[in-house]
Image (cartoon, rainbow, N blue to C red):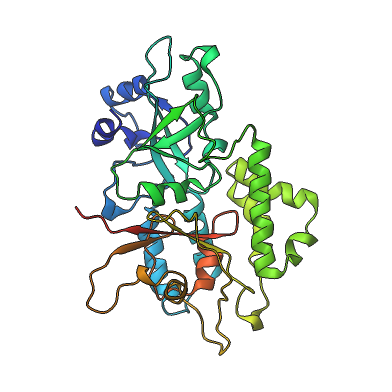
Amino acid sequence: MCRRLAASGVFRRFSGDSRGMTASTVAGLLSSEPTAKPRQELRSLTRRELVAVLPAARRCLPLDLLGGARSLCATGSGSNMADDKDVLRDVWFGRIPTCFTLNQDEATEREAEPYYLLLPRVSYLTLVTDKVKKHFLKVIKADDVEEMWFEYEGTPLKWHYPIGVLFDLHATNTVLPWSITVHFKTFPDGDLLHCQSNSVIEAHFMSSIKEADALKHKSQVVNDMQKKDHKQLWMGLQNDKFDQFWAMNRKLMEYPTEEGGFRYIPFRIYQTMSDRPFIQKLFRPVSPEGNVHTLGNLLKEMYPSAIPNDGEPKRFQVVIHGIEPLLETPLQWLSEHLSHPDNFLHICVIPVPTD
């Protein structure tokens, strides 16, 4: 159902927000002719077009960002504040067209239609799916409702990972919309953390920011912030307010010019072929000799098999926010511009598709 609608161009007339649509609403859109130019052109993207979807009047994130990476990162020069803010804005407004369907084993009083959302890459599933919950609660028997959780092709989705990381890790090479199954019973305690309220998400988010600042600035910046400053970071994320968030987050991205970067780069490398949740170690953006460390330098030390030797076929894709940055990109630039709101650079290493 979800893939058929995507092929029909159902996402063509979504607006730039994350509002939801049921199948019946979608059918109405497909049967009507638009009377004005749509605010946003959304369609089923191929793997080559990567997977980021941006709001009105903006190009696809991978195309913009790869161009920026080639001109700004590989050379290490030519950047300016306007260009940088455009990159930050494109990252923030990345969206993933998603189709939510209720698990077929859930007891319902009538048929449950799928529900469609544009999911923000930088947010968390449990933070942006209240509409999904309300939609399916209309058809589920009250006695059968427990904690809501999500699954993709048999894999429970960890709510404390950013949405973009979940997609890049599990569904990068799938056809859009991303098809997620919703459950209200049989919570997988061994795989997922419980999340009963937004306060749990906030606590996790702020803990990650504090951990990242401990690596970057020995916690000096976050400790100098007031409680209202912490709340501004959280509210900016919760309410999807780019300017509100970055007015405060920019302080966490500053460093003395003479040091050439942060003390350490907050990063996590995720692997689909490992039981280990992720790789996280200390790594500086600049070598003791003063050489700028790149994404390739990080991978060679932390995950050597991710980089093919000369003459070897490529075995892995190294994906950040749905794109494959150049290995020559300085790690400091990536940390400043492609980190998630939690201030970590989330890197997914996935096998190259065989088809």
On screen, residue 193 above or below 291? above
> As drawn, is 50 to the left or to the right of 68?
left
On screen, residue 288 above or below 147? below
Which residue sits at x=26%, y=67%? Answer: 314
Decide which of 182, 250 is in the foreground and name it.
Answer: 182
Which residue sits at x=48%, y=56%? Answer: 276
Of all residues, the one furthest to the top in this rendering is 109
Residue 57 visible in the current orientation = no
Q: Give the position of the N terminus as an image quadrant.
A: top left
On screen, residue 274 above or below 114? below
Which residue sits at x=73%, y=51%? Answer: 230
Residue 278's spot in the image, x, y percent? 50, 58
> As drawn, is 272 to the left or to the right of 259?
left
Residue 263's spot in the image, x, y percent? 64, 74
Of all residues, the one furthest to the left in this rendering is 355
Decide which of 46, 185 is in the foreground and name it.
Answer: 185
Residue 277's spot in the image, x, y percent? 50, 54
Residue 188's spot in the image, x, y percent? 50, 34
Q: Please tell me how many numbered marks the rendered image carries.
A: 0
